[in-house]
Image (spheres, rainbow, N blue to C red):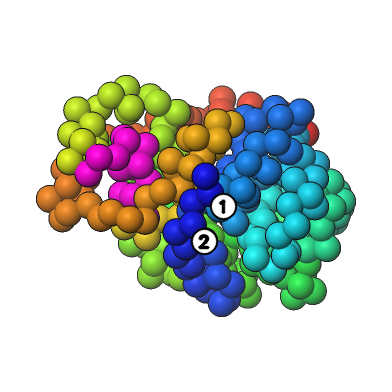
Amino acid sequence: MTVTAEIPQIALNNGVRMPALGFGVYQIPAEDTEQAVSEALAAGYRLLDTAASYGNEDGVGKAIAQSGIPREELLVTTKLWIQSGGEEAAKRAFAESLERLGLDYVDLYLIHQPLGDYYGYWRAMQGLNRDGAAKAIGVANFYPDRLVDLIDHNEVPPAVNQIETNPFFQRSDYQKLMIERGVQIESWGPFAEGKNNLFSDPTLSEIGAAHGKSVGQVVLRWLVQRGVIAIPKSVRPERMRENIDVFGFELTNDQMTRIADLDTGRTMFFDHHDPEMVSWLNGRRAG
């Protein structure tokens, strides 16, 4: 069964329209990616999110090529990993991603981490945006200080900041700041990878039961109602269909408040202010 409900579109700060819900391929093995993305497209997803560091851009591109879906109906995101060499290296990395994807352009290109010469990366990305090779550009994992500094010193503000956002780390105050600066918040890890027993959480389970929905659907609906774009991942077609089927119900104000009370204000994964984590990220290579 294909989900037929139309996914709402959100206008970014440069007019590009982005689906409110998409499909992420983080941690999907390269050999399984084409099949997973093909099934996601069949289920109705039109926003696809990958990255050079995931090592599976090829599979995403093959699925797009085989889908028969007009290119203009898709919003394809990929990300620039930490590069040595700044601006010129960023241009080369983008060309390599484009080749792996088999595309003439990407709809959204993100700096993956707030590390390295990201001012050089951003200069390159502004050029790619001007040339139409990247229809929109943005960042990921940027904390408020670095996001504001990047905006204040550049011509083009990020259209998107993709950050950890889930019921236990909600980022509500940061979202308000991004709205003020015209930056769209996008959630990675919307289910916190099941941490804190998310899928058996009593509050989320009770709300789900009230609507005849799963905990995962409640979480995604909560994000959608907050205006947060989400990119859940799954390799199971039935779960893909379930995740996209969140536009036929609405959480009440009381339910939204109860979920807000789950916020711990702390990351469920890692802290970019941790020197050891910064060194580890800087030591990784894309692909």
Residue 170 pos. (x, y %): 33, 45
Q: Nearer the viewer, residue 118 or 111?
A: 111
**Looking at numbered disc 1 in the image, what kind of residue is underneath it?**
Tyr
For residue 206, say whether it is visible.
yes
Does residue 266 appear left or right of residue 65 in this picture? Answer: left
Which residue does the numbered mark 2 point to in the structure image?
A: 19
* Residue at 79% across, 49% down: 66
Does residue 182 appear left or right of residue 174 in this picture? Answer: right
In reply to whether residue 215 is colored magenta, the answer given is: yes
Which residue does the numbered mark 1 point to in the structure image?
A: 45
Q: Nearer the viewer, residue 231 or 264?
A: 231
* Residue at 48% across, 35% down: 239
Residue 192 pos. (x, y %): 41, 32
Contact, mark 1 vs mark 2 (Cβ under 8 Å): yes
For residue 163, say whether it is visible.
no
Magenta stretch bounds: 211-224
Residue 26 pos. (x, y %): 61, 35
Magenta-highlighted stretch: main secondary structure?
helix
In reply to whether residue 276 is colored magenta, the answer given is: no
Quadrant assignment, res 174: bottom left
Q: Judging from the image, what secondary structure is the residue with disc 1 in?
A: loop
Q: Can you tell which of label 1 and label 2 is closer to the viewer? A: 1
| Up/down of 12 relative to 89, above or below | below
| Up/down of 192 relative to 52, above or below | above
**Looking at numbered disc 2 in the image, what kind of residue is underneath it?**
Pro
Does residue 73 appear left or right of residue 144 in this picture? Answer: right
* Residue at 19% across, 28% down: 202
